[in-house]
């Protein structure tokens, strides 16, 4: 089980093994018997076992100390980790050994849909909070959260400003960029802000570091379907911007002129998407290659790649998750140097449940939304060091020994299964980002804590927590070639 504020899981063998080695509060390793099994997989592009030894990695767990559904995570160049969920900004500058709230009075608002972002170039930290459905408050800090400034952003006459997302990226030489219709920018990076207004996705560009958003508007096309729900914003080193709408066919919306115009590209028709649909995400590496990941119709995690800055995408999907993981949700991805990527998701291996009825009385299809009460979901982290190869290798680790959630995970706010309290406790997404060293950090909400985690007879009724939690790669391969193998940071 997850113990105290610090836990190290050592993944050392390919085959399943019971009994992890834990480090509690930075002390000597203690043998603690697990509720479940450590799981390690080495798979190819079809999710099948390759029979190869894994890359040895250590993952460190930290309890943030606050509830944290829909968390965002970012790391500044000083090494401080920022975990943003609900109305609080939590900071750790000692790799998760301690946390403190640094929200600041300028940004202390009650919200139903927060979002956080750390600019990897300037270190500016953004805390975006909703105020009702008409206005959001965008706050920023340039001193590791010691002080904050902020301004409201009004969504206009249509009273909806939902599913907010923010990101930053380089200026280009066209459109809203430095050489385009606006010749001067006031901030080193373009700042992008997108949200759904019920009729589509609205995206805006800021020239003053996020203080105001004067340029932008609605994105048309497939982005208008499904009410404008969408995933995170991603910007590549060459300035290409990606937004992912929640639609039936996996789709990426791309801008090469800082949000002045947008094109859409589809992929993944061979594997599709499930319903209810959730966020997909794009990561870009240091050479602007793009990796789009999503949960497919069979509940596996899939990927399509673009090596021409989003101009074209593979139409044969690559499976990232092992075939033993039969249900997944909340996939997130980040990348370092070409071919070096990290993915996280919640997944279940409870294959024995497939014959049991789900919420609609039919046999369970593997969809997290309809899982039976005894299904358990864990957190998985996957690394690939050759993700651009024709047949990449994926190293997948189930890092949690007790479940993150028991029973179903609601993927549709209007249709949630009520078992001892709403199963929408985890809300819509988790997050993954790397730091300047190429170290992987994952933010997630833990739905099974305390007695739920320690009792082998826990049920879905016991799994209604939303504890803010972090795993990071303590030692193992960096996503940057020049760094090589990393050692524990403490």
Image (tube, rainbow, N blue to C red):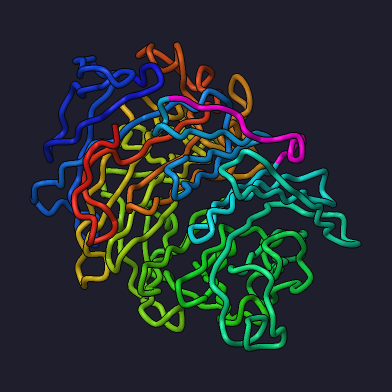
At x 30%, y 65%, the residue is 337
What is the magenta segment's predominant secondary structure? loop
In terms of image quadrants, where is residue 400? top left
Q: Nearer the viewer, residue 138 or 42?
A: 138
At x 76%, y 34%, the residue is 105
At x 19%, y 21%, the residue is 19
Q: Nearer the viewer, residue 46 or 1?
A: 1
Q: Nearer the viewer, residue 71 or 89?
A: 89
Q: Position of residue 300 (x, y in %)?
A: 36, 52
Residue 236 in sight from this viewpoint: yes
- Rendered view: 57 above or below 272: above
Q: Quadrant of the C terminus?
A: top left
- Rendered view: 457 above or below 244: above
- Rendered view: 399 above or below 484: above
Q: Position of residue 167 (x, y in %)?
A: 58, 60
In terms of image quadrants, where is residue 348? top left
- Rendered view: 235 above or below 312: above
Report the span colored magenta.
98-112
In terms of image quadrants, where is residue 146? top right
Q: Quadrant of the N terminus?
A: top left
């Amino acid at each position: 089980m997850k113990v105290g504020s610090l836990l190290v899981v050592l993944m050392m063998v390919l085959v399943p093994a019971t009994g992890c080695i834990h480090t509690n509060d930075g002390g000597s390793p203690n043998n603690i018997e697990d509720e479940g099994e450590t799981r390690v997989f080495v798979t190819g592009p079809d999710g099948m076992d390759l029979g190869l030894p894994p890359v040895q990695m250590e993952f460190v767990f930290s309890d943030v100390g606050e509830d944290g559904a829909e968390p965002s995570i970012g790391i500044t160049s000083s090494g401080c980790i920022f975990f943003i969920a609900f109305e609080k900004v939590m900071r750790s500058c000692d790799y998760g050994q301690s946390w403190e709230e640094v929200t600041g009075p300028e940004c202390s608002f009650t919200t139903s849909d927060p979002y956080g972002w750390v600019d990897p170039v300037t270190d500016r930290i953004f805390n975006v909070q909703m105020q009702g459905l008409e206005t959001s408050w965008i706050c920023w800090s340039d001193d590791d959260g010691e002080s904050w400034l902020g301004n409201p952003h009004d969504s206009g006459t249509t009273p909806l400003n939902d599913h907010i997302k923010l990101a930053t990226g380089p200026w280009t030489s066209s459109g809203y960029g430095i050489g385009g219709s606006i010749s001067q920018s006031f901030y080193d990076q373009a700042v992008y802000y997108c949200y759904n207004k019920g009729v589509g996705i609205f995206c805006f560009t800021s020239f003053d570091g996020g203080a105001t958003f004067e340029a932008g508007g609605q994105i048309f096309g497939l982005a208008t379907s499904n009410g404008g729900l969408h995933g995170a914003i991603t910007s590549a080193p060459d300035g290409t911007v990606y937004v992912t709408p929640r639609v039936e066919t996996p789709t990426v919306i791309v801008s090469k002129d800082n949000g002045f115009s947008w094109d859409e590209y589809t992929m993944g028709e061979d594997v599709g998407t499930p319903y209810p649909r959730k966020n997909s995400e794009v990561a870009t590496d240091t050479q602007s290659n793009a990796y789009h990941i999503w949960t497919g119709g069979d509940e596996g995690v899939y990927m399509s790649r673009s090596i021409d800055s989003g101009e074209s995408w593979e139409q044969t999907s690559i499976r990232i998750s092992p075939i033993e993981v039969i249900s997944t949700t909340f996939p997130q991805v980040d990348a370092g140097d070409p071919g070096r990527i990290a993915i996280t998701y919640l997944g279940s291996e409870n294959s024995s449940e497939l014959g049991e009825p789900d919420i609609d009385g039919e046999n369970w299809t593997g969809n997290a939304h309809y899982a039976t009460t005894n299904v358990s979901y864990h957190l998985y982290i996957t690394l690939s060091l050759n993700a651009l190869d024709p047949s990449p290798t994926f190293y997948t680790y189930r890092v949690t020994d007790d479940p993150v959630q028991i029973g179903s995970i609601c993927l549709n706010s209007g249709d949630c299964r009520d078992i001892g309290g709403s199963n929408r406790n985890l809300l819509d997404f988790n997050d993954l980002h790397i730091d300047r060293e190429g170290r992987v950090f994952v933010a997630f909400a833990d739905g099974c804590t305390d007695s739920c985690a320690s009792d082998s007879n826990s049920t879905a009724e016991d799994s209604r927590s939303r504890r803010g939690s972090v795993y990071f790669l303590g030692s193992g391969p960096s996503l940057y070639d020049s760094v090589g193998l990393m050692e524990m940071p403490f």
